Amino acid sequence: MTDTIAALASGRPPAALAIIRISGPAAFAVVRSLAGRVPPARRLSLCRLVDQGQLLDEALVAVFPGPASASGEDLAELHLHGGPAVVAGVLEAVTAHPGVRLAEPGEYTRRAFANGRMDLAQVEGLADLVSAETASQRDQALALAGGALGRLADGWRTRCLDVLAEAEAGLDFAEDEADVAERLDEAARGQLTAMADELAGLIADSARAMRIRDGLTIAVTGPPNVGKSSLVNALSMRDVAIVTPVAGTTRDAIEVPIDLAGIAAVLIDTAGLRDTDDPVEAIGIARARARAATADLVISVASADAPGWPGDSGLRLLNKCDLAVPDVPADVLAVSAATDAGLPALRDWLASWARNVVRPGEPALLAHARHRAAFAEAESALRDAALAPEPVLRAEALRGAAHAFGRIAGRIGVDDVLDRIFSRFCIGK
Ligand code: GDP
């Protein structure tokens, strides 16, 4: 018999409320023993929770009979007062019940998946939703959790199976009506190539989806002491990077997450990019150069009180414009990390750059390497099918493409990735 699992589903106490979820065959027996009754389904009912004559809390209790519950099993939620002693007392009483134990991370969702309540792409979307920090990450995660990718992959799977059915019908022609078979063959090749091209477009767009999820990278580069760390601090409005008047003290690349009008980005505060004899500093510089080389945007910073204009790449900034006011070239933004002058314009520039790169209003669904790999596999199978010299080989390749799409929803061949996907969840989810 399946274990019944219990866990705190809300944040760490103390808090205004705490929610304990209980899922499994003994869930309602636990509620009956604590509350004295099983209240009406899918409604909140005020109950006194009593264990061995001891009042533990007055709580709102909701029960959801399986299989139409979030986990697909009998599920109960206890909405408690969020004090540490309340939560500890109730959890202890719940898990003392026979057949009930504390849940593992992600175990409720794992049961929902096992019971067919959600497909694997929805599970991934849910994990993204719980960790989403910006509006565009949230929108993308909601689309994924709502099943948009599963529907897209299912549509593609059906298309592949339709072509497969035609290809198999075509096998019968081959014997006696060679010219009909040839015409069918030509049409099928064209159709398969068009499908593969369409997939290639979706795959190319996955870089955008991944950037929405992982954040854009922006390297802030320039000589020592021009104010890179000060700018990173000013932009992130946090004191993360260490600002000192001594040249070369930012030894390592420091990454600071920022929210660019709803789009996630990471500012990389590079060590002063200069030659040095100090081996520790040299390591920081090598790493900074490597990060800067792969960043989505490089901000080149120079200082108004030192000779030299900012480098040519990416966005050019002249900092410390509170000290001197030189005639700046048109494509150089004059700012001051000390007085905040020019920083609103800098934020606007970055936000509109970010919007251009990720186009947050347009749906982008292939946000995970797993999704991209499955679509890429299907694309190459469709190209194999288009080039197949024999109908039998074409059918084989088409079955491969359909199989790749089936893996998106997790219907087949995903045993190896399940542990990794569910390990992203916290306990109680
Ligand atoms: P980094 O080496 O490029 O990261 O430079 P820092 O951010 O550590 O700044 C070097 C020095 O310049 C520090 O003493 C900062 O306080 C100062 N500084 C940074 N930005 C400005 C600015 O806009 N105006 C002035 N006057 N000083 C600044």
Image (spheres, helix red, strand yellow):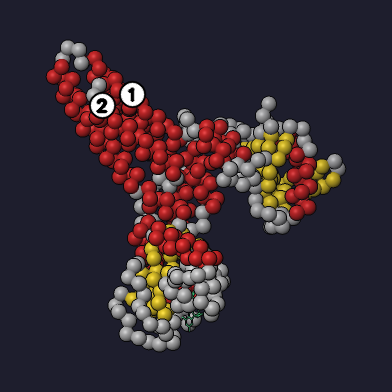
Q: Quadrant of residue 64?
A: top right
Residue at the extreme front: 277
Drawn side of residue 25 relative to residue 249, left or right: right
Residue at the extreme bottom: 324
Residue at the extreme right: 53
Relative height, residue 189 to residue 361 (above, below): above
Relative height, residue 11 to residue 372 (above, below): below
Label 1 Cα crowd, 10 Å radius (few <14 / some 14-19 / many 20+): some
| Residue at the image point whose x is 51% and y is 50% from the top | 129
For the residue pair 319 and 116, the one nearer the viewer reads as: 319
* Label 1 vs 2, first from the N-terminus: 2
**Separation of residues labelled 1 and 2 (CA atoms):** 9 Å
Q: Quadrant of residue 45?
A: top right
Drawn side of residue 46 relative to residue 259, left or right: right
Q: Position of residue 280 (x, y in %)?
A: 54, 65
Drawn side of residue 406 relative to residue 192, left or right: right
Disc 1 marks which residue?
A: 396
> From the image, which quarter does the N terminus lie in?
top right
Q: Is residue 48 visible?
A: no
Label 2 amino acid? Answer: Ala
Q: Position of residue 163 (x, y in %)?
A: 28, 27
Question: Which label number is shown at residue 388?
Answer: 2
